[in-house]
Image (spheres, rainbow, N blue to C red):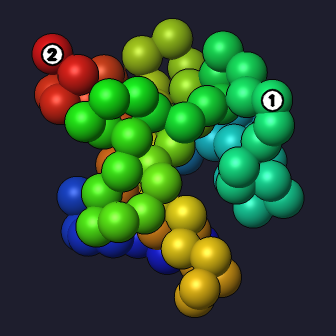
Amino acid sequence: MKFFNTPAAKGWEELCRQAPGNTEKAWAEIRKEPRPFPGSARHHRLKGRLSTENGLEQWQYEVTGGGRIWYLVDSDQQTVWITYAGTGHPKATD
């Protein structure tokens, strides 16, 4: 797992401060199964225009009621790219 950009890394740090147990659980689940099937209410692929970015599938993990992690799955590079992590809903969903 790698951070796509600095804001994603900083958001991850904030999630770790505010919800350490849930963030650790999210990290473990994403690492183990980045494309869960079937998905769940907490862990699923994003839909519509948010479902892909840079040609890669984009997924979401709901860490808390408002906290989210968005990530891309790059099978060729065997890498999960964290594109968003934060304690609030991503602005792209507004």
Question: Mark 2 belongs to which amino acid?
Answer: Asp
Q: Mark 2 — residue?
A: 94
Marks 1 and 2 close (CB-CB < 8 Å): no
Q: Residue at x 55, y 64 (%)?
A: 73
Label 1: which secondary element: loop
Label 1: few (<14), some or many (≥20) within 10 Å? few
Q: Quadrant of the N terminus?
A: bottom right
Residue 11 visible to the viewer = no
Q: Earlier in the sequence, mark 1 or mark 2?
A: 1
- Looking at the rendered structure, the kind of residue marked 1 is Pro
Residue visible at 15% across and 16% down in the picture: 94
Count of numbered badges drawn on the protein: 2
| Image quarter of residue 54 | bottom left
Horizontal and vertical percent for residue 82? 44, 60
Residue of label 1: 38
Task: Describe residue 26's horizontal placement relative to residue 61 as left or right.
Answer: right
Q: Residues within 10 Å of mark 2 (few under 14, many from 20)?
A: few
Q: Quadrant of residue 22?
A: top right
Q: Nearer the viewer, mark 1 or mark 2?
A: 1
> What element does badge 2 sit on?
loop
The percent coordinates of residue 33 (x first, y second) are 80, 53
Could you tell me which residue is drawn at 61 percent across and 31 percent down?
Answer: 44
Q: Residue at the spot x=43%, y=63% of the render?
A: 56
Please state which of residues 39 and 63 is positioned toward the viewer in this rendering: 39
On the image, the x and y values in percent for residue 79 come to: 59, 78
